[in-house]
Each structure stands twice: as structure tokens, then as C-alpha cells.
Amino acid sequence: MQTEFPPLNDIQTAELNPNLEAPIRNDWSRAEITAIYQMPILELTYRAATVHRAYHNTGEVQVCTLLSVKTGGCPEDCAYCPQAARYQTDVKAEKMMTTDAIVGKAAEAWQAGSTRFCMGAAWREVREGRDFDRLLEAVKKINHMGMEVCCTLGMLTESQAQKLKEAGLYAYNHNLDTSPEYYNDIISTRDYQDRLQTLENVRKSGISVCSGGIIGMGEAETDRIGLLHTLATLPEHPESVPVNALVPVEGTPLEEQEKVSVWEMVRMIATARIIMPKAMVRLSAGRVRMSLEEQALCFLAGANSIFAGDKLLTTPNPSYISDQEMFQILQLTPRKSFQ
Ligand code: SAM
Ligand code: DTB
Ligand code: SF4
């Protein structure tokens, strides 16, 4: 049987030549992204690795640390999330951490070599008051330590984004999670447009945008492509794109989902790398179930950032020691902050 190889169009050729000024495009069509996503996997990886080399130092991987500053009890119904109050999971609702406790955790992460500290809260949206004030104070202090400070707190207004910016927030994470078409199958308590609005509010305040999604939630290939298409056609690409593999948690509606193949992760990462060349592409949730070799493939395909530390927000992540070993074996070095 004859196999048809997708043709290299002129724009892609330009992007693949490190000596040419490769254009950053925001007008990708779904058909173009589909052709890239569906390329023979080795060809796709090669092309993504070439774009990666043209835009980034391939020996460097950014190491970020996550901390759940307000865990559980969330009113939303995200089908993947162990922190949603309505699902019976092992996660217990806790109060907001104090500023000092948060800053202490950031100092530990800094000493362990992490240059970005991301604080997560199980909120639908930010509400102004004591908890938000504590957070602003923590942002200020961690920024002064020399770390890039990031938050993921749910929906955000323009003026709240401005307050975070003034406190020294570097980046804000707000994932689109999946395609606009599949979104309502996963979350019913807010819509895609709400997510896009928050991203716009973040962008307007001058905070760096971090937005990506999750695979392995029962979505079709077209939904993965739809997510990538939405991200790559935003007025400006996110500076950071996390690619998460679902961590199925007992008690959530998605507890029975099967693990996605590493090739699906590689396709997502490689396609993101090719269509958003400058972005940091983060190999995020799901690393605990990946071998070193599988993660190496993801780095080859253009991933250049990870979360380190034995816990993500509430679920396990590879140990600090095993990641150090991985960096040694793959001869990778952690990226410095604010580059
Ligand atoms: N509550 C805020 C929100 O939803 O924007 C911030 C925290 S929320 C836990 C951050 C992101 O974590 C979600 O958008 C989702 O992409 C990811 N996430 C949550 N649970 C996950 C899981 N079980 N597996 C993979 N990713 C997950
Ligand atoms: C992102 O895209 N992945 C991280 C971070 N942004 C906040 C969160 C992953 C959470 C995995 C489930 C948990 O540990 O609760
Ligand atoms: Fe709440 Fe965020 Fe979890 Fe959704 S993903 S249930 S908004 S903590």
C-alpha cells in the first residue's frame, strides 16, 4: 500500500531552516495542524527537534515547582479534578496557607535548583479579600528571592491581574484543557469563553501567559488538534504551554480512563513546538507513569520544561533524586530564571 506523506509547504520549510528568520504565525488552519500532527512520528519528531534547536538551547530544561496553597473544596465540576468538592476523593479541603508557610516552601524549592514557583488554588475564580492579600504578599516576597513567580487561581478580572502584576507576578497559568467542542463534556460550571476572557485579561496586564491542556480524557484526535489550534491562533502565543497527561484519580468521573500512549504525548509536544516555536513547552502531569526513555523522547520532540518535586498539586510526581539522575543521564541542565 502506498503511504502519502504530507508535503512540506514553504512556510514550514522556512521554519525548519535555523538560518532563516522563521515566521511566528497566528493564522494556522486546523487542516495544517492536522497534517503536522498526523505526520509519521519519526519525521514529526525530527522536524520539531529542528524547530526546537532554532529557537532554544536544547541542553536546557526549565525546572518549576508547584505548591497547592489552597487545596480542595472547589465548587467547579472539572471531570478530571480530585479537588472538586462534589467528588469523593482522598483530597480533603484545607484552608489557605499562610504567607510565611508559602514563602518557606518557595525557599526550599529555590535551594533545590528550581527557578519558577507556581502556586495553585482550588478556586473557581479570584475573590478579593484576606486570602488574595496573603497571596499578593507571597508573590512579592518570592519575586524578591529572584524566582519567577507563577499562579493558577482560576478566573481573573483585569484589575485583579493588574494587582498581581504590581506585586511582581511573572506568569499566570490558566489551561484551556481541550477543544472548544469537547469542553462541555468535561466541565459544565463555566465555559470556554470564560477561559479565553481570563487569558485576555492576563495578557492585557503584561503578565506572561501559560496555557495548555490535558490528553487522555477520552477526547478524539480532532479535540487535541482543536486545543492546539485555539492556542496557536490566539493574538499572541502563550509563552508557556503545559501538556498534561491525565492523572486518573479515584472518585473522579475520569477515574477509569486508560493511560495514553507516549506517542500521543510526543505528537502533542512536537506539534506544539512546530506551531508555537518560541513557547516553553512543558511536559507536565503524567511523568510518574513515564520511563526515562519516554521522557527523553518528549524532550527530543521539543519539551523544555518540567515540574519537579514529589507532588504536583495533589497527585504524585517523580522524586527530586530521580529527576536529578535523569538530568545527568540526558546531560541536561536547569535553565536560569528570567531568560
Ligand atoms: N482552579 C484553578 C483552575 O482550574 O484554573 C487552578 C488549579 S487547576 C488544578 C490547574 C490545572 O491542573 C487544570 O486546568 C488542569 O489542566 C490540571 N489538572 C487538574 N487535575 C488534573 C489531573 N488529574 N490530571 C492532569 N491535569 C490535571
Ligand atoms: C498544569 O498544566 N499542570 C499543573 C499546573 N498546570 C498547575 C497541575 C497538574 C495537576 C495534576 C493534578 C494534581 O496534582 O492535583
Ligand atoms: Fe476547581 Fe481548578 Fe480543579 Fe476545576 S481544575 S475543580 S476549577 S481546582
Image: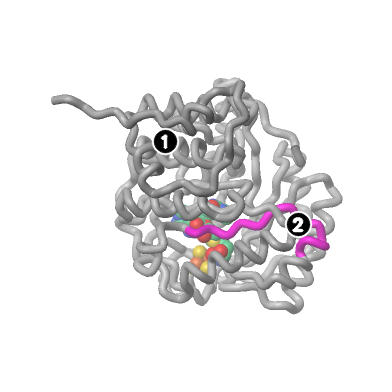
For image coordinates 54% across by 23% down, the residue present is 17
Disc 2 element: loop
Based on the picture, tell me whether residue 166 belongs to the magenta stretch.
yes
- The answer to whether 319 is drawn above or below residue 58 in the figure is below
For image coordinates 47% across by 39% down, the residue present is 269
Disc 1 element: helix
| Count of numbered circles in the view | 2
Residue that carries the numbered disc 2 in the rendered image: 169
Q: Can you give x and y, in whole percent of width and height, for residue 198 in the image? A: 60, 67
Q: Is residue 292 visible?
A: no
Residue that carries the numbered disc 1 in the rendered image: 266
Quadrant of the rendered image containing residue 97: bottom right
How far apart marks 1 and 2 lie (CA) works out to 31 Å
Q: Can you give x and y, in whole percent of width and height, for residue 46 in the image? A: 44, 24
Quadrant of the rendered image containing residue 260: top left
**Along the viewing direction, whichever of 89 and 46 lies nearer the viewer:** 46
Based on the picture, tell me whether residue 248 belongs to the magenta stretch.
no
Q: From which residue to which does the magenta span run?
A: 164-176
- The answer to whether 95 is drawn above or below residue 8 in the figure is below
What amino acid type should be assigned to the residue bearing mark 2? Leu
* Residue 83 relative to residue 9: left or right: right
Q: Can you give x and y, in whole percent of width and height, for residue 261 in the image? A: 33, 39
What amino acid type should be assigned to the residue bearing mark 1? Val
